[in-house]
Image (spheres, grey):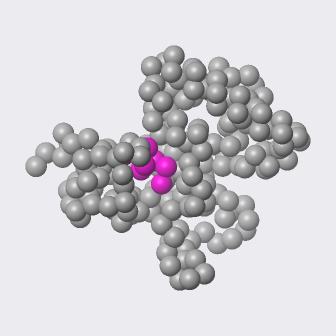
Amino acid sequence: MDYTQFDDAALIAQIARQDRNAFEALYSRHAAQVLGVVMRLLGERSLSEDVAQEAFWRVWRLAKQFDVTRGNARAWVFSIAHHLAVDTLRKRKDGKNVELDAEDENGETRDLPDEMPEVLTQVWDKISGERVRTAIKQLPEAQQKVIELAYFNGLTHKEIASELNEALGTVHTRARLAIAKMRELLVDMGAKL
């Protein structure tokens, strides 16, 4: 079977059936980009490789849970990687040991962070990174900074407010305006949001 002809959703459907060849095809298709997204957040090659590996391991384990009606497959894979990277970044900031397969207080392995993907994450996952970078460059400088700190550094709005010495409301407003402007710019560039 020629898996290179399958789209991502079809590959994930095959992976849900424990098809290793489909997994290898999905991995080959997206591993470098997943590693790039994780590297931008973590900045450390070895840890980024571990996080990317864990992201694909979770894709293997969670493929049965993927619902094509709720989003596209590529976005799903990239959101798993992004959330793992942000989780890892936050644990490092808090001085906690980073354990990618950490168990919760009930001894169950957490599969995904509880938080829903932010709008920017969804936008990033739906279109190429080049379009996003182009759109970010067109934002006012203050909005650019907020988006970069939130997405590329994994900071919360509260952390951004502290970093920029700005009021939390100001950061919320800049983020909201930036996301709205980015949506408009990305639609103009042909992205389907």
Q: Residue at x 41, y 46 (%)?
A: 70
Q: How many marks?
A: 0
Residue 188's x, y, as percent?
A: 51, 16
* Residue most extreme to the front: 69
Q: Is residue 79 magenta?
A: yes
**Residue 76 in view here:** yes
Say which quarter of the image contains residue 98. Answer: bottom right
Q: Is residue 168 magenta?
A: no
Q: Is residue 104 above or below residue 115?
A: below
Q: Residue at x 60, y 48 (%)?
A: 41
Q: Is residue 99 above or below residue 4?
A: below
Tell whether 24 sits left or right of 193.
left
Highlighted range, magenta = 73-80
The secondary structure that most of the magenta stretch takes on is helix
Residue 134's x, y, as percent?
A: 57, 23
Q: Residue at x 78, y 28 (%)?
A: 142
Tell whether 113 sits left or right of 162.
left
* Residue most extreme to the left: 1
Residue 99's x, y, as percent?
A: 56, 71
Q: Is residue 90 above or below residue 34?
A: below
Residue 55's x, y, as percent?
A: 44, 58
Say which quarter of the image contains residue 19. Answer: bottom left
Using the image as rendered, state which of residue 76 and residue 44 is in the foreground. 76
Q: Residue at x 49, y 75 (%)?
A: 109
**Residue 47 in view here:** no
